[in-house]
């Protein structure tokens, strides 16, 4: 192989600002909004948007904390690296592996959902189409990180356009600018009132809403593969704030006004019901196509994110070092292929045992993302405390009202995790996720005892002025 064909030693800086901005925005908009919102509207009534508002505040605070750390030291490991710096090797190991576990299971689950969506138009077994969708997204990720960024840019663009179109049409409908329809907000108070099932249900609805909003943190992982990571992270982080309020709270509020909450069916997109109420033909097909795009976006992001996290774990000695090898395109091919194999296994488990093994995997990964978010908050609190006044003054992006809002965010996430034990529908998720956490901690102790080798040199970080210089000892 000639010198020009040698694989690069570091990840490529191919992502542009527009890619990272859309990755952050697109990460917030998924099937959880288009379909998952049905569960909250069905149980909480018109006040469902309050659950999304509370959740949105927590997600925005987490992204701000993560943005502060990522602009200081952007790296592919992102929050796993910050957890390692703050609390030691065990924190980086568990955070990285839990996040990887969440996304590889999500990859398989999204492929399964995509296969079922395609059955509306194609008369083939869903598992066959799930395999085809997964292979298509693997192909885009194998080409280059730029290829991933372009696909995600357009996927996110379609989702944003769909939401904006719905917001425009929905607002015209509820304010009486629609043909043969006058302004009507009665669905907010009819059918049992604004909170037909009480405020307790709204608070427990935060548990459901959280899982609809995961994903914007991917931008901080991808930032290490951009030319100007600090600037890119700052812009992507700030873009999430307004979009969460605009897309989620705005669209769910419109849904509550247009559609009587008593008509919403769990598992069926309330957006379809809204389009039907408004008299727009082809609503089911339109939303099926939009949800399919959301699924493809999640597949694309899940493969990228899980491969980069595994790549980072290998560089830290927490996974086989062969996984850290890059191909000539700067893609960690082995870590990407491993994520793909797990995705295929999940598709097979859904085909063979949908109600037992596959359901077990989904439940076991359910609350792990919240544990990761909690570690992000705790890491930011710890690392900011280690900084001097001069280092704080040089921060490009600062957490608001530190430490009060940081503590509030960490407390909010912990409250959601604890409340999951008291909500029957989420009790199995939190129990199995805690089991996954314990298993990861045990694996770390075994790794340290059996193979205590030093990690590879960390050549995947992007140096930035004013780094945190006093890491916690392992």
Image (cartoon, rainbow, N blue to C red):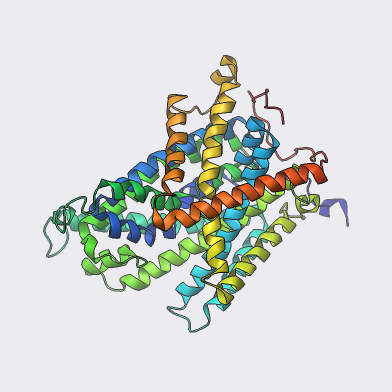
Q: Position of residue 380 (x, y in %)?
A: 55, 30
432 sits to left or right of 446: left
171 sits to left or right of 94: left
**The quarter of the displayed image where residue 169 is located:** bottom left
Q: Nearer the viewer, residue 50 or 431?
A: 431
Viewer can see residue 12 = no
Q: Position of residue 350 (x, y in %)?
A: 56, 72
Q: Position of residue 355 (x, y in %)?
A: 51, 71
Residue at image point 60% right, 46% down:
222
Query: Considering only vertical position in the picture, is 108 above or below 88?
Result: below
**The quarter of the displayed image where residue 187 is located:** bottom left
Residue at image point 21% right, 59% down:
258
Q: Nearer the viewer, residue 366 or 426?
A: 426
Position of the N terminus, as image quadrant, is bottom right
Q: Nearer the viewer, residue 200 or 34?
A: 200
Position of the C terminus, as image quadrant, is top right
């Amino acid at each position: 192989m000639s010198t020009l064909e040698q694989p690069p030693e570091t990840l490529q800086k191919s992502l542009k600002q527009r890619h990272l901005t859309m990755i952050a925005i697109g990460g917030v908009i998924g099937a959880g909004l288009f379909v998952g919102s049905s569960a909250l509207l069905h149980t909480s009534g018109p006040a469902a948007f309050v659950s999304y508002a509370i959740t949105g505040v927590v997600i925005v605070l987490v992204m701000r904390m993560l943005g502060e750390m990522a602009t200081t030291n952007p790296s592919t490991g992102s929050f796993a690296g910050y957890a390692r710096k703050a609390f030691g090797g065990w924190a980086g190991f568990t955070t990285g592996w839990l996040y990887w576990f969440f996304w590889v299971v999500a990859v398989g689950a999204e492929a399964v959902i995509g296969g079922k969506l395609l059955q509306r138009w194609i008369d083939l077994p869903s598992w066959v189409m799930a395999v085809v969708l997964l292979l298509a997204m693997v192909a885009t990720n194998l080409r280059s990180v730029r290829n991933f960024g372009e696909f995600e840019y357009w996927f996110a663009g379609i989702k944003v356009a769909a939401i904006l179109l719905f917001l425009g049409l929905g607002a015209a409908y509820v304010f009486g600018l629609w043909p043969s329809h006058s302004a009507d907000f009665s669905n907010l108070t009819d059918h049992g009132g604004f909170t037909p099932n009480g405020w307790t249900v709204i608070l427990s609805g935060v548990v459901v809403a959280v899982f609809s909003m995961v994903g914007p943190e991917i931008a901080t992982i991808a930032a290490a593969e951009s030319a100007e990571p600090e600037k890119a992270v700052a812009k992507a982080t700030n873009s999430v704030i307004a979009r969460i309020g605009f897309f989620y709270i705005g669209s769910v509020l419109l849904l509550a006004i247009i559609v009587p909450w008593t008509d919403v069916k769990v598992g069926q997109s309330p957006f379809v019901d809204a389009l039907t109420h408004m008299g727009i033909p082809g609503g089911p097909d339109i939303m099926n196509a939009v949800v399919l795009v959301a699924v493809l976006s999640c597949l694309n992001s899940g493969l990228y994110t899980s491969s980069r996290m595994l790549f980072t774990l290998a560089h830290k000695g927490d996974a086989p070092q062969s996984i850290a090898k890059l191909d000539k395109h700067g893609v960690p091919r082995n870590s990407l292929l491993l994520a793909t194999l797990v995705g295929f296994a999940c598709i097979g488990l859904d085909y063979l045992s949908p109600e037992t093994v596959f359901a077990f995997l989904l439940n076991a990964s359910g609350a792990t993302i919240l544990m990761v978010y909690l570690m992000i908050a705790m890491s930011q609190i710890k690392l900011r405390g280690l900084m001097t006044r001069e280092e704080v003054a040089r921060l490009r992006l600062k957490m608001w009202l530190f430490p009060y809002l940081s503590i509030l965010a960490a407390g909010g996430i912990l409250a959601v995790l604890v409340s999951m034990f008291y909500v029957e529908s989420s009790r199995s998720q939190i129990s199995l996720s805690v089991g996954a956490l314990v298993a990861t901690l045990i694996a770390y102790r075994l790794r340290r005892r059996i193979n205590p080798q030093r990690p590879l040199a960390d050549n995947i970080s992007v140096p930035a002025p004013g780094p945190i210089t006093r890491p916690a000892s392992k």
